[in-house]
Image (cartoon, rainbow, N blue to C red):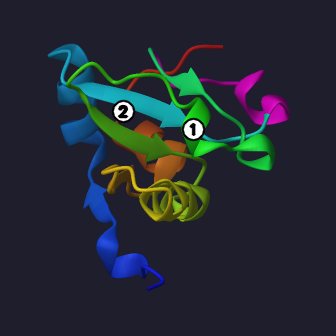
Amino acid sequence: MALGRDSVKDLHPEEVAKGLTEGKILLVDVREPMETDIERYPQAVVMPMSEFDPSALPDPQGKQVVFACRSGNRSVTASLIAQDAGLPYDAHLAGGIKAWKAAGLPTET
């Protein structure tokens, strides 16, 4: 059975930032190197969508895995791929880094 968009939870930037601060979220950035070289989410693991392999995801050690990208499209796709591989990773950063910055949250360069 193919999973649909409704099997991915939208998390708002403030929720994700709080989870990172509290050590409860593992943020996985699926943007490409040409994007992450310019600007990155703090504390994110970078796994470009072009070579995304859910079996290569780091052990979240009890943290919630949240996927992120530029605007929220690739992160949904990454979550669906992970779920198709049998992983319980069903959350993404709604709006991506655009929403993150609009919320006034910091990035690294």
The residue lying at 38 percent from left, 57 percent from top is 94
Residue 5 appears left or right of 70: left
Provide the residue designation for mark 2.
104
Q: Nearer the viewer, residue 49 or 3?
A: 3
Task: Check the image and report above or below for 69 versus 23.
Answer: below
Q: Is residue 38 magenta?
A: yes
The residue lying at 26 percent from left, 50 percent from top is 12
Q: Quadrant of residue 10?
A: bottom left
Q: Quadrant of residue 16?
A: top left
Q: Which residues are magenta?
A: 33-42
Which amino acid is tagged 1? Ser
Mark linked to residue 55: 1
The residue lying at 49 percent from left, 44 percent from top is 68
Q: Nearer the viewer, residue 74 or 41?
A: 74
Task: Check the image and report above or below for 32 versus 70.
Answer: above
Give residue 52's position: percent from left, percent from top: 69, 44
Prevailing SS of the magenta stretch: loop
Give residue 43's position: percent from left, percent from top: 44, 15
Give residue 6's position: percent from left, percent from top: 32, 79
Give residue 58's position: percent from left, percent from top: 48, 23
- The span from disc 1 to disc 2 (Cα, nearest Å) is 33 Å
The residue lying at 20 percent from left, 15 percent from top is 23
Residue 17 appears left or right of 83: left
Q: Nearer the viewer, residue 5 or 70?
A: 5
The N terminus is located in which quarter? bottom left
The C terminus is located in which quarter? top right
Query: Circle 1 — which element?
Result: helix
Query: Circle 2 — which element?
Result: loop
Q: Nearer the viewer, residue 89 or 103?
A: 89
Which amino acid is tagged 2? Gly
Neighbor class of circle 2 (other Cα within 10 Å; few <14, some 14-19, many 20+) is few
